Amino acid sequence: MKSYIVTNRKSWDDRVQKHYESEFYDVEGFLAGKSSLNDIELEAIGNVKGKRLLHLQCHFGQDTLSWAREGANVTGVDLSTESIKLANQLKTKTGLEARFIESDIYSLPEHLNEKFDIVFTSYGSIVWLPDLDKWAQTIQHYLKSGGIFCIADFHPFLNMYDHEKNTLAFKYFAHKDEPYIEVADSSYTENTQNESLEEVFWSHPLSEILQALTDCGLKLQSFKEYDYSPYNCFANMKEIEAGKYVYGDFPVAIPHVYSIVVQK
């Protein structure tokens, strides 16, 4: 387990500055007041004013700070040292109240001993985790009684594709002992070409995600699927409406994103 954490920490440490500088993240617009959150997660969670929110795998904190703008008392967590440094810089620039903690998800109880009204994670997060049972147990641990967890993420059906080659390349059903280990030559932002960063990731079907959450006693409140992505972050995508992108040229709609809300 430690070896994949070291590998992935290095890959995110090495790319986060380019992400911060990219048009994709539009930090300049964010500093001018633009929210980085999408309608999908805003509608799923609802009013956060005065609530304590824990954001898992927060990258450099843009979404975390957007939740602060919505009125939440926020804590962001990420395994990348450089991401947490940039998150704290962004916090200073915005003047928003937030706390950022450097930790992988499974080690978080060693660094944080509190309860939250909301736990949140989003797009591109859980593919970096091998054990969703332990992930769900961590979520359950941090929720207050009556608190909710929300995930909005790319649909595992979409994650089966090699988007550049436009072909199925990854398993839908996989085991935690069967990671994909690749050397990536680019990331999802427009300014990360010619990289050479090793990364380790896993495929998780929806059944595994839902079962992990319900097995630890969390009650399903909402499960939705969407036939578009709010991000133009894969090759061969096209914009069908403002802020809505679809992959490929399929004759029928395919799932792109899902959201789940569960309650303790």
Image: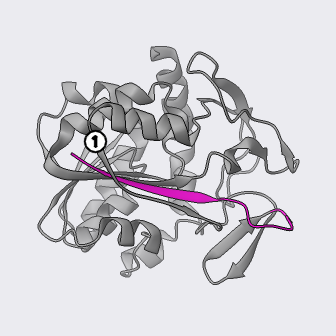
Left or right, 242 with respect to 5, comes to right
Tell me residue 94's x, y (percent): 28, 70
Q: Which residues are magenta?
A: 248-264
Q: Secondary structure at mark 1?
A: loop
Residue 172, located in which quarter of the rendered image? top right
- In reply to whether residue 145 is colored magenta, the answer given is no
Query: Which residue does the image show at 68% across and 45% down from the upper left?
Result: 159
Does residue 87 lie above or below 67 as drawn?
Answer: above
Does residue 188 lie above or below 133 as drawn?
Answer: below
**Residue 117 visible at all:** no
State the residue in front, 52 or 43.
43
Residue 113, located in which quarter of the rendered image? top left
Tell me residue 261's x, y (percent): 35, 55
- In reply to whether residue 258 is colored magenta, the answer given is yes
Query: Which residue does the image show at 36% across and 81% down from the upper left?
Result: 33
Q: Disc 1 designates what residue?
A: 218
Residue type for callout 1: Leu
Local crowd at mark 1 within 10 Å, few (<14), some, or many (≥20)?
Answer: many
Q: Quadrant of the C terminus?
A: top left
State the residue in front, 93 or 219.
219
Tell me residue 92's x, y (percent): 25, 62
Left or right, 89 with respect to 247, comes to left
Query: Which residue does the image show at 68% across and 47% down from the upper left?
Result: 157
Tell me residue 196's x, y (percent): 72, 35
